[in-house]
Amino acid sequence: MANVDIIVIGAGLNGLVAANYLAKAGKKVLVLERRAIAGGQAATESFGKEFQADALHAGGQLRPDIVSDLDLAQHGLPASVSEPLISFLPDGRQLRLTADPDEETLASIRSLSKSDAERWPDFVAFMKEAAAFLDAAYRTPMPRLPHVTLSEGWPLAQLALKLRRLGPKDMFRVIRAMPMSSLELTEEWFESDAVRAAIGAVAIHGNTLGPMSAGTGYTLMHNWLNRGGPGHLRVEGGTGRIADALVAALKARGGELRLSASVKNMLVENQTVSGVRLTNGEEITATTVVSAADPRHTLLDLVGAPELPPEFVWATQSIKMRGAVAKVHLLTDGNHGLPKGTLVIAPTVRYAERAYDAAKYGEMSKAPYLEITTSGRVASLHVQFAPYTLRQGDWEQLRPVLERSAIDTAATVFPQLKASIRETKLLTPLDLEKTYGLTEGDMNHGQLILDQMFFMRPIPGWSNHKTPIDGLYLCGNGIHGGAGISGASGRNAARAILKAK
């Protein structure tokens, strides 16, 4: 592609969203993807004959304004359908939770606690308000504190006004809930431990935190926003359909996507980027480069520490990754006995906390928190916790142990499952790093914790997508607004780039 204006590294959803906004603005955009498939974490992949699965994310949706801005429905993006979250309890009962407090949901909660059923609609209303505020925060560019210009301060003032519009009661609740643990938050709403545990499972999903960890009030809001409630939003045909629509839209706007094009390093001179060098030796020039890879890999591997200020290198090295998620995909004969829905095995708060306790000490959880989804004959087990860094052994040795633990745990609730399995595909945290480029297997590109959120993401003082290298921008999950399937950080990065030009 001759005369490229902008190179985007990575064809995950954030990279594709950024590329589309830039192409829509008339820029000549080239997206480079190291793998032979687009979508990044949202890829729907084939692991064998009739064995197709959403590799890492069971569901999700781009923010509605992105879908509208980029006309993605016209490029084949199907609607997402919300699933209920179904928590399986030791006594054989099932707890069903939805963001629509229908009678089936209320009856399920009522079987555990009458007062909790009465409070559920109010809790859902509060969570919708909290998610709406968080969505507004993710739209708002974070300034490079402590030096805030007038142009940067105005969006923050508008965000503060939105927070005030929640009303004094909900404004106080939202601010207070963010640093709280999900257990503390839910104790103020519900008396049933099973209800607290199910909500806590939503809070810790994808994060190396337990329901008693500070800040899981914030991760609960974050995941609730991205899911549209407690259960996943499922895309017909798989999450890969989102990437397909973005690729089609990009090509229609004149952008180019090159697969199997791995970037070896940036071309940098006098702290200014001038393009990239691929692993095959090819050099491609551009005045602007946008990286959807995680900040640590982008800055320390693709740019290199010698090109960066020492204190910035130290801060980048200190980004906390700590991935602890594994996936076990199962091709069955169809008689797996699993109902439709987001199925959760985390029956009590103590159960989920003990699963996290193991990861704190570099051990796999013997009784892991599982979230299970199905698509035809395929069952996908999201496993927590399986830490990237193990105290004893390595992932090559312990792969069969993890697979057996996950399947055995699922079989305690679904006894038909084991006999129905025909093939398995295990993705350990090490696989997430090697195959999907996720440093330390962290799907968030940096944990969603109190010292890595808002204006401190990815590192304090650099929350506005810029870097010390002129012309190099960040747009991945590790930036403010990222983590999960939303496209927010890609949209925000594109706007920052266009504003600067």
Image: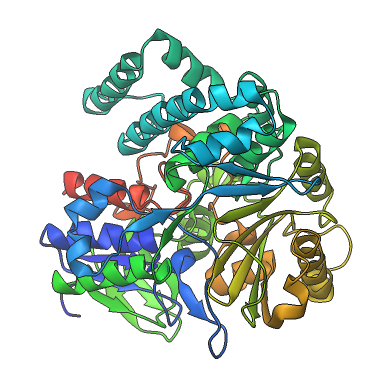
Residue 167 percent coordinates (x, y): 36, 12
Q: Is residue 6 placed above or below 469 in the rendered structure?
A: below
Residue 347 percent coordinates (x, y): 75, 43
User: Left of 374 or right of it: where is 474?
Assistant: left
For the point 84% across and 70% down, the residue is 401
Tell me if I can see residue 459 in this picture.
no
* Image label count: 0
Q: Nearer the viewer, residue 131 or 302?
A: 131
Say which quadrant the N terminus sits in: bottom left
Q: Quadrant of residue 18?
A: bottom left
Q: Residue furthest left?
A: 26
User: Left of 496 or right of it: where is 325?
Assistant: right
Q: Nearer the viewer, residue 254 or 462?
A: 254
Q: Residue furthest right?
A: 392
For the point 61% across and 70% down, the residue is 379
User: Left of 495 or right of it: where is 110?
Assistant: right
Q: Residue furthest top?
A: 168
Tell me if I can see residue 342 in this picture.
yes
For the point 58% across and 75% down, the residue is 378
User: Left of 497 or right of it: where is 307?
Assistant: right
Q: Nearer the viewer, residue 435 or 204?
A: 204
Q: Quadrant of residue 76?
A: bottom left
Residue 437 percent coordinates (x, y): 54, 67
Residue 420 percent coordinates (x, y): 71, 79
Q: Residue furthest bottom?
A: 49
